[in-house]
Image (cartoon, rainbow, N blue to C red):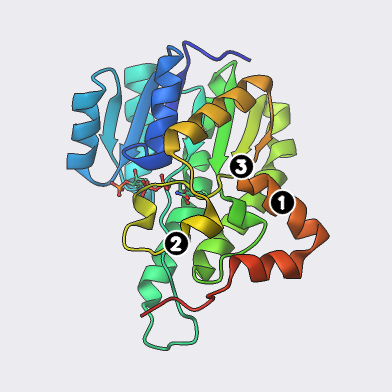
């Protein structure tokens, strides 16, 4: 495995975890390309990190993702590492018929369908690399759901099982599959969401990227920083107990 001089594509690299991972890959002399929907966010990152490459792409848009493959192949002669990181989280009360169905469908489209789409279209480029890695960013909530975000929890669990399933399928094509399952990290995903710091013990994105990198260069396939490793263990040993601990308030405040 090579850890520098690689072309790295990160979906949702304009803030939070994606941006911290982008900086970590750049610190280690890789060429980093990030994508996101909000152009001003991307441009701000470019001003602060002139070496980064930015593309305004919505991962849910099939045509945009297909065009990106051609663009990247032409400009960078392919990619070696694909990080499926873009994601959103909505608090939803499934018991309230007034909830926003469209937003929930969109959440599935971004968090679960899009990693499948992005891999599908980038597969030929990954197959061209002699050091191909797919990194899927799921969540510690793939082990124990957060009831206030039921669709989110479902997408992360689905992403976790998809990742496990495709690992042996991509092995014959020499594509390594890594899964990062973050614990609670202080990012924009929590804007307007009230999480108890005492219960969830959030960490900073840079700290997560440091842990990721240490485990990544060790060759770990499932990276479970901080509380995520406890969630993994507890989901096996005492699943009802840990569910109750994480979900003292299962219904989002209105
Ligand atoms: N923060 C946590 O506690 C935590 C814990 C576990 C897992 N995660 C996962 O980590 C990943 C990153 O989240 P974050 O916490 O770093 O949140 P964030 O700061 O809100 O970052 C989300 C990123 O995804 C991009 N994005 C969202 N929808 C997109 C779309 N349709 N097309 C392209 N880009 C899109 C956003 O850019 P635009 O809005 O400009 O498109 C942004 O760059 C997510 O998959 C999240 O589920 C987060």
Q: Name which of mark 1 and mark 3 comes first in the sequence.
A: 3
Q: CA distance from mark 1 to mark 3?
A: 11 Å
Q: Spot the residue most to the right.
A: 237
Quarter that holds the N terminus: top right
Which dot marks residue 226? 3
Q: Name which of mark 3 and mark 2 comes first in the sequence.
A: 2
Q: CA distance from mark 3 to mark 2?
A: 17 Å
- Seen from the viewer's position, the closer of residues 223 and 107 is 223
Which dot marks residue 232? 1
Residue under the point 67% across and 27% down = 173
Residue 91 in picture, x, y percent from top left: 43, 69
Mark 1 lies on a secondary structure that is helix
Q: Name which of mark 2 and mark 1 comes first in the sequence.
A: 2
Q: CA distance from mark 2 to mark 1?
A: 20 Å
Quadrant of the image occupied by residue 145 = bottom right
Residue under the point 59% across and 15% down = 130
Mark 3 lies on a secondary structure that is loop
Task: Let me know if residue 241 appears in the view.
Answer: yes
Label 2 Cα neighbours within 10 Å, binned few <14 / some 14-19 / many ≥20:
few
- Seen from the viewer's position, the closer of residues 163 and 138 is 138
Question: Circle 2 sits on which residue?
Answer: 195
Residue under the point 65% across and 61% down = 144
Q: Please report contact status of discs 1 and 3: CB closer than 8 Å, yes or no.
A: no
Q: Please report contact status of discs 3 and 2: CB closer than 8 Å, yes or no.
A: no
Label 1 Cα neighbours within 10 Å, binned few <14 / some 14-19 / many ≥20:
some
- Position of 193 relative to 131 (above/below): below
């Amino acid at each position: 495995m090579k850890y520098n001089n690689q072309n790295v594509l990160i979906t949702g690299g304009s803030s939070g975890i994606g941006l911290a991972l982008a900086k970590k890959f750049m610190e280690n002399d890789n060429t980093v390309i990030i994508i996101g929907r909000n152009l001003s966010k991307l441009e701000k990152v470019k001003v602060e990190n002139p070496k980064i490459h930015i593309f305004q792409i919505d991962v849910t848009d099939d045509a945009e993702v297909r065009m990106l493959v051609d663009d990247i192949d032409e400009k960078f002669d392919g990619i070696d590492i694909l990080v499926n990181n873009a994601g959103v989280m909505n608090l939803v009360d499934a018991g309230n018929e007034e909830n926003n169905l469209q937003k929930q469908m969109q959440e599935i489209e971004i968090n679960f369908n899009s990693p499948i789409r992005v891999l599908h279209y980038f597969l030929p480029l990954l197959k061209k690399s002699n050091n191909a890695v797919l990194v899927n960013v799921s969540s510690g909530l793939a082990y124990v759901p957060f009831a206030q975000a039921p669709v989110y929890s479902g997408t992360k669990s689905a992403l976790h099982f998809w990742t496990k399933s495709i690992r042996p399928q991509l092995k014959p094509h020499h594509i390594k599959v890594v899964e990062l399952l973050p614990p609670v990290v202080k990012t924009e995903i929590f804007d307007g969401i009230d999480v108890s710091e005492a219960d969830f013990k959030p960490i900073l994105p840079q700290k997560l990227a440091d842990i990721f990198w240490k485990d990544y260069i060790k060759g770990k396939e499932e990276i479970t920083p901080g509380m995520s490793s406890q969630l993994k263990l507890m989901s096996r040993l005492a699943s009802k107990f840990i569910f109750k601990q994480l979900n003292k308030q299962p219904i989002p405040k209105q």
